[in-house]
Image (cartoon, rainbow, N blue to C red):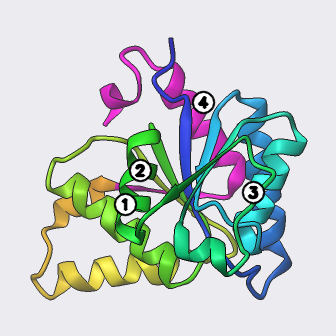
Amino acid sequence: MPDIHSVAVFCGAQAGGRPEYAAAADALGRGLAQAGMRLVYGGGRVGLMGRVADATMAAGGTVTGVIPEFLTRWEVAHDQVSDLVITDSMHSRKRHMFDLADAFVTMPGGLGTLDETFEILTWRQLKLHDKPILLCDVAGSVRPLVAAIEAAIAEGFARSEVRGLYEVVEGVPAVLARLRHLATAPGGASALL
């Protein structure tokens, strides 16, 4: 049995300024559904979050949204997903998404996306998990994030080994291929990391 059944996707609550971002969210959602992998995401119906959820469901996939209660009052919760989990805080949202996920994919996004990505990277650095973390580069979107990590290494605040905590993957087709490979590898995802 493959070890990757659920993929947490971190992405923007905005659509972003390039049409490539929306197209990538749609492609990722379709691809996860076709691969039989559940989407775990931030529970919103707006921006790239809404697009990846809608695309997953349109392709027959399963979607679990995880959203803090205060955001449901802002009317951004996606009420059509397979399962909507309402948490009491942003912190418990991230923990719940972590618990549900077998792997993580970062797509283009803003501060929330960066926060989720850096937290899951930090948890892996601290050996709290060994789940794959894929940074999906869409039209150069990952470059600033990787530059921040490289700056921390260059300034002596992080060891060069942190580069092994994540993989930069060029585009959605390559991300989906990597997830399929990890899911079917002998010993599962952790055997390759």
The mark nearer the N terminus, 3 or 2, is: 3
Per the rendering, the mark at residue 52 is 3
Does 31 appear above or below 37?
A: below
| Quarter occupied by the C terminus | top left
Per the rendering, the mark at residue 92 is 1
- 100 or 110: nearer the eye? 100
The mark nearer the N terminus, 4 or 1, is: 1
Position of residue 1 measured from the top left corner of the image (x, y, whole percent)? 50, 11
Does 24 appear above or below 4?
A: below
Q: Nearer the viewer, mark 3 or mark 2?
A: 2
Magenta span of residues: 166-193
Magenta stretch: helix, strand or loop mostly? helix
The mark nearer the N terminus, 4 or 3, is: 3
Q: Which residue is mark 2?
A: 96
Q: Is residue 113 left or right of residue 26?
A: left
Amino acid on which the number 4 mark rests in the picture: Arg
Q: Which residue is mark 4?
A: 180
The mark nearer the N terminus, 4 or 2, is: 2
Q: Compute the Cα span from label 4 to label 3.
A: 18 Å
Amino acid on which the number 2 mark rests in the picture: His
Label 1 near label 4: C-beta < 8 Å?
no
Task: Name the residue: 44% across, 37% down.
Answer: 102
Q: Nearer the viewer, mark 4 or mark 3?
A: 3
Q: Secondary structure at mark 4?
A: helix
Task: Name the residue: 73% across, 69% down.
Answer: 48
Position of residue 37 measured from the top left corner of the image (x, y, whole percent)? 64, 32
Residue sticking out furthest to the right: 58
Task: Name the residue: 49% across, 84% down.
Answer: 111
Label 1 near label 2: C-beta < 8 Å?
yes
